[in-house]
Image (spheres, grey):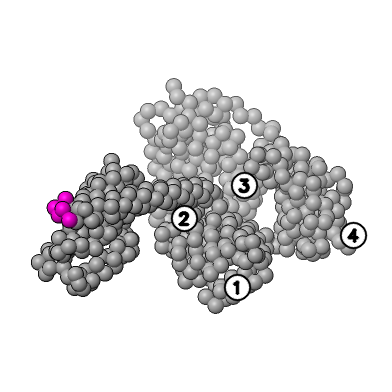
Amino acid sequence: MVYGDAELRTLSAPDRWLRIMPFALVTLLAFAVAWLPPRVSPVALVAAAGLLAVLVLMVVLTPFRRLPAFYEALPPLGFFGVVLLLNAGVDGPAGYAPLALLPVLWLALYAGRLATAIGVAVMTLVFLVPALLDEELRRAEWRRGLLVGAAGVLMATAAKSWTNRSRAATREARRERDFNQAILDSSGFLVMVVDASGRVTAFNRRCEEASGRPAADVVGRLYHTLGLSTMDSAALLAAMAGVAETGEAPPAERDWIVPGGRRRIAWSTALLKDDDGRLLHMICTGIDVTEQRRTERLFADVLAAATEQAIIGVDRRGVVTVFNAGAERLLGYRAEDVVGSAGLARFHAAPDDPETLFAPARAGDSAARECVYLRRDGSQVPVAVTVSVIRDEAGEASGYLSVARDVTRERRTVEAMRHALQRERDAADRLRELDKVRADLVATVSHELRTPLTSILGNVEVIVDGDAGEVAPPQARLLGAVERNARRLLALIEDLLMLSRIEAGAVKINASPVQLRAVVAGALEALQAVRGQREVRLDVDLPEEPLVVHGDRDQLERVIINLLDNALKFTPSGGSARLSAGLDGEQVRLTVADTGMGIPEDEIEQIFEQFFRSSRSHERQSQGTGLGLAITKSIVERHGGRIWAAPAAGRGTVVTCLLPHRPN
């Protein structure tokens, strides 16, 4: 290789003109003295200047970095031509031969060994060529040429030795710098080095990531001009001057202004001083605590907002580390009085309560448990406590966080509800007793009234039939009224007795497959007399296929009689009633609709209650006991069915009954 060190490509380096400048000044001096005796001929001087201009243009225009390193030796080797032209332009000794030392020195400093050897050889030729051409000059100047050549070799050797040492030192410094930079970049900390003047000399990769700025834009600039700090320049300079004066830099947290917001950095600073104690560098090591501080603020806000819960945190020794405003309000202590100095047992009425709470939490049980807290004034308060474990990076329990809620009011409410519920139960028991007494009374009274009333009706029938003698027309009218009212009383008594028997469970449901058509036929036959007295059209719509119901025929017949009797009773003359039936899934749907007076919507849910009569039936003074639909509902439900009523589309009422279907 012409170049011994490939990285030293001088003519393509950014500072090449600084290196060329000393050589250029010597060359200009050589051209300046060319006008002094012995003068250089104008032709030789112009030729030398032209060759020098060509060499300068070569340095300016040639892309040496893209070419092999050998090409960088061409301009200094070409400079020997300038020396030859200047020497040849003078008759006799010209004195320009020492100028040949310039390219040799350049090659020794900036080129490899081979290029330097070529330069020494060419320099020797520069001295020997004139002597070879002139006999007299050869006799007079051969010693000087020989000595200058030897001196050139010695100078080149010394320059090369110095250059090698300089290059070795440069490489060592570069390796040391790269090694230190690799250490800085591999560090998980932000590392920034600032010299005594406040100029940044190192800016590692973590600093680049945190600030969003490349190190190339930061290194070499004054820190206060970077716009990173939230402090103004004057305050920042004053702080740095204070560090330089006192020699102390306590840890501090500062905000960095970065693209998109700010980052919170916790800095620790080490000071590097010389032997005289003067500050050389400040080595600033930082940790980005932005997320940590944000989490801490969020946690503090949550603690401050949770005024209804007492949140207490403890470390693994049980010493309090967190004591929020809710805990202050509940227990009467101030946070600064207990944090770091008190144990959780202080707040528990039972000393072993904390461990009984911690053990389930360690086992993963986070259910709330009730215990009793002890206030500062000695009073006790019941609380519901939930404890969770705080674990470190290794998964070990490093502390506990308890969240307690005052349950005094809840306990009072629960106690009040318990007493109220007990009162309700007692009242219900009394009502059941009263209802039983009522049922027994109704059954007894009804039974006792039924016998004399039957006797009254029998005697009235004997008198009306004339078996006891002739009855005058006025007497017949009175006896008819007695008979109608007696029959009404008998119907009421029968209904009361039936209802009492149903409620007492004395009525047996003899269920068997029953043809619905036969049940409807029996009901229509029983209502024959009623239908003849009322001018209401009754339509019956039954499907052709037989509908079989699983139930008690007599009880089902009573259901249809009650429904049709109500429809006929509350429908005015000229109206109509309709009975229809059909399958509805696995049930038989039985519907009785009429065009009668209807029932108000706010009363529709009450019509199946005992003794209930709608307001419209009261207005029309319709007769009835108010027990028929109650009996009907009881029978239907005992069959496993359902019954309800709704207003008809136009006017009137629709009663729907669902009964269990028994397929053939």
Q: Position of residue 528 (x, y in %)?
A: 48, 40
Q: CA distance from mark 2 to mark 4?
A: 56 Å
Tag of residue 209: 2
Crowdedness near tag 2: few (<14), some (14–19) or many (≥20) residues, C-alpha within 10 Å: few
Tag of residue 528: none
Place residue 303 in its image quadrant: bottom right
Residue extent of the magenta highlight: 132-136
Looking at the image, is mark 4 or mark 1 nearer the viewer? 1
Q: Is residue 301 visible?
A: no
Whether tag 3 and tag 2 are in contact, CB under 8 A, the answer is no
Up/down of 64 relative to 509, above or below: below
Amino acid beneath label 3: Leu
Up/down of 121 relative to 662, above or below: below
Q: Which residue is mark 1?
A: 241
Residue closer to the observer: 301 or 316: 316
Q: Is residue 153 visible?
A: yes
Amino acid beneath label 4: Gly
Q: Which residue is mark 3?
A: 627
Sequence-first disc among 1 and 2:
2
Sequence-first disc among 4 and 1:
1
Amino acid beneath label 2: Glu
Identified at 46% across, 34% down, the residue is 588
Question: Under tag 2, what secondary structure?
Answer: helix
